[in-house]
Amino acid sequence: MDELKALSLLERKVVWLATWMIHNANHVRPNLDGMKVGGHQASSASLATIMTALYFSVLRPQDRCAVKPHASPIFHGIQYLLGRQTRAKMENFRGFGGAQSYPSRTKDGETVDISTGSVGLGAAFTIFGSLMQDHLEAKGALKGQPLGRFVALVGDAELDEGNIFEALLEGWKHGLRNCWWIIDYNRQSLDAIVREGLHGPIVSLFKSVGWDIVVLKYGDLLEEAFAEPGGDVLRDWIDRCPNQLYSTLAFQGGAAWRARLLDEIGDQGPVSALIERRSDEALAALMTNLAGHDMAALLRSFRAIDHDRPVCFLAYTIKGFGLPLQGHKDNHSGLMTVAQTETLRDAMQIRAGHEWDKFEGLAREEAALTRFLTAVPFAATDKRHHKAATLALPDWVPAEPSTTAISTQHAFGQLMHALARSDGELAARVLTMSPDVTVSTNLGAWVNRRGLFGRRELVDLFRAQRVPSTQKWDFGPTGQHLELGIAEMNLFLALGAAGLTHSLFGERLIPIGTLYDPFIARGLDALNYACYQDARFILVATPSGVTLAPEGGAHQSIGSPLIGMAQPGLVSFEPAYADELAVILQWSFGHVQEDDGGSVYLRLSTRMIDQPRRPMNPDLARQIVEGGYWLRPPGPNPDLIVAYSGAIAPEAIEAVGLMAEDRRDIGLLAITSADRLYHDFQAACRAREAGDGAAMCAVEQLLCVVPQHCGVVSVVDGHPAGLGWLGSVRGHRQRALGVERFGQTGTAADLYRHNGIDAAGIVRAGASLSRNRPIRHLRHIA
Ligand SMILES: Cc1ncc(C[n+]2csc(CCOP(=O)(O)OP(=O)(O)O)c2C)c(N)n1
Ligand SMILES: [Mg+2]
């Protein structure tokens, strides 16, 4: 059997499997709660030819693909035919433990290279995946592995997402290569038909950032018809036909095409004969023969690419192609009826009860197709998720306690400098990156030593010309810092890609990204996406909170500690002191490499604060990593404790000092990670509920020395809810202080006072918790 025949049969089978998978989930599988299950039959059919061509012929094992999320059923169907997906999972599509609604690396496993779901992100990820491949190759880490292409299957409406533009520009800056985007130009979004002429801006956009453009508009049937007498008139009609009309006619079918064409161009001589020569069925097939559904045309175009420049294929398609839903503007979440499904089943000669059988209806071709499938190049390996060796932790001894005041941001810079000077394997695999805030987040010393990554050398002319500058900004293949533009989305996409190299390429990077804490929000969906893919990275965010006083409300973060707590796959810390940070960073280097580890977010500060003079010991280090320790343990009978996180430590210490005048047993709890304490607490609760009566967690251990009647004041330069749960651990009354209003300019002292998180505010809160106590302390600090 020739390839074209095999692919055409497989394409039909793939459409059937996708359609049936969705039908089964919605109409066959018992539905216990009456909720619509959903699935996207039309969006799937739109990509069926392209994905069949790619997976069964064009892709090579080293290529990686981000599939348009709502083409997931096609993807699962293809994997099933390749023997990498089970019938049970497909029968349970969109069910608990079943094949996922949108392809997921972590849930669907080995078959999925790049998760998708939130449109725009999977496509953009391919750009950063390819950059990481370049970085590893330049380091010699790929050891001759062939370079793969990063391929994105992109919906046309997906291009509306702003992150697409940001990523394209960033790719252009880095000389992107080995990247293909195939745009499913069905001219339909979820709600509607897209604007006329959208192909124009799409083509200029990709051209402007240096991509090759291949417009795949007409299939071979149409091209042949254009060569017939009158064909030029037909072509001209198609080119002028508004998207809405084309879609409507595609939905209505052959008779409607004929009526419309004859009405509009039927009096123009030979074209009438061209139309009349064809039956309704043949006319419908001709008019919907767009290149995105023409296997031969697709194969030719894909195979013609013999270079590594980025290529955008703009493939004209019809949403719902080949299904009764085709072209209808409401087809995005439309489902075929039972009768329509049965008609399709009969047309494919599939017997009832044999819907999942791979070769049902293809008995005569079964042997040839089986041979074809075993020879598919992409399927030469089924090992798509790799494992990488664990890198030994750096053997730096946490820096000597600083004798001068220092900020956690500054301490981070010092630690990175120490790492830059070391020569361990881990340091060699660190890749830092920052969205245009490298210097202001204190990565300067690291970059000066390790250089910037670029496939080609680019010398810092200021340095070459001996113009004094604190920064060496030299690029080269061995550089270990990725200079990114300001777009925070790109930072998280790049961290996501760098944080998956162990799995994508079997070679580990330790990505460290720095940015301004408030602007985490700008890239939040990409951060969530990176964590969803189980990417491993360390995120270092400074400055943070209203402590960044004179910068004002536009730069002061409030909710970020809650982001850190609420984000699965990301452990957050907010240390106050340099020695805490050293311990946490060391732990983070291990955590990002553990099988069941995750990523880390460090919320740091630019506030210089006096450091405790203390030797680090294993017990303290353990507590710092667990999330908290007593900076001042409570005495035997305290009636108040203060718990704080981060740079607000001096206020908490001052307040405790003031209150200690008449409350000698008052305790001061340093919380280095509310996130870890909280999740550990939840885990202990679950363990006890599951019958493990002895389960106990770090925060319970810390608070077990605090009597029941004692009050708890918590304080953080961030939203108070971050620590607001502490009282619930053992039933203590609590007053949670923090920031709940937009910030504004001022000194840190002004803003602490304004938000009631200064020492006086802490004292007032403490006094209010024990009603019998007058607020005497306030006199001292008025
Ligand atoms: C960030 C984000 N916003 C909204 C959605 C919901 N959504 C899913 S598909 C879609 C329309 C996609 O249209 P297009 O990309 O043209 O794909 P088609 O179904 O036409 O192939 C929308 C709005 C989403 N998945 N992600
Ligand atoms: Mg579309």
Image (cartoon, grey):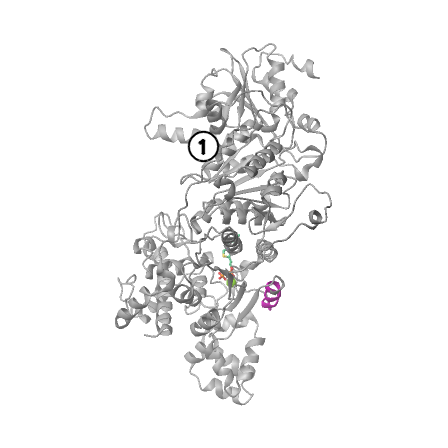
In the image, residue 177 sits, relative to residue 467, either above or below, namely: below
Q: Position of residue 287 (x, y in %)?
A: 48, 77
Q: Position of residue 269 (x, y in %)?
A: 54, 90
Q: Position of residue 435 (x, y in %)?
A: 61, 46
The secondary structure that most of the magenta stretch takes on is helix
Mark 1 crowd level (few <14, some 14–19, many ≥20, 10 Å Cα): some
The answer to whether residue 108 is visible is no
Q: Give me the residue at 31% from left, 59% from top.
A: 83
Q: Quadrant of the N terminus?
A: bottom left
Q: Quadrant of the C terminus?
A: top right
Foreground of the two, 506 or 678: 506
Foreground of the two, 453 or 282: 453
Specify the quadrant of the image occupied by residue 609: top right
On screen, residue 760 versus residue 394, left or right, reads: right
Foreground of the two, 95 or 119: 119
Which residue is outermost to the bottom?
A: 269
In the image, residue 133 sits, relative to residue 472, either above or below, namely: below
The answer to whether residue 100 is visible is yes
Q: How many marks?
A: 1
Is residue 205 on the magenta stretch?
A: yes
* Residue extent of the magenta highlight: 196-206
Ligand 1: does it lie within 8 Å of the C-beta at label 1? Answer: no
On screen, residue 394 versus residue 162, left or right, reads: left
Q: Position of residue 507 (x, y in %)?
A: 45, 48
In the image, residue 42 sits, relative to residue 112, either above or below, namely: below
In the image, residue 126 sits, relative to residue 615, either above or below, namely: below
Q: Could you tell me the amino acid type at mark 1? A: His
Foreground of the two, 112 or 191: 112
Is residue 405 on the magenta stretch?
A: no
Q: Give the residue pinned by disc 1.
A: 679
The secondary element bearing badge 1 is classed as: helix
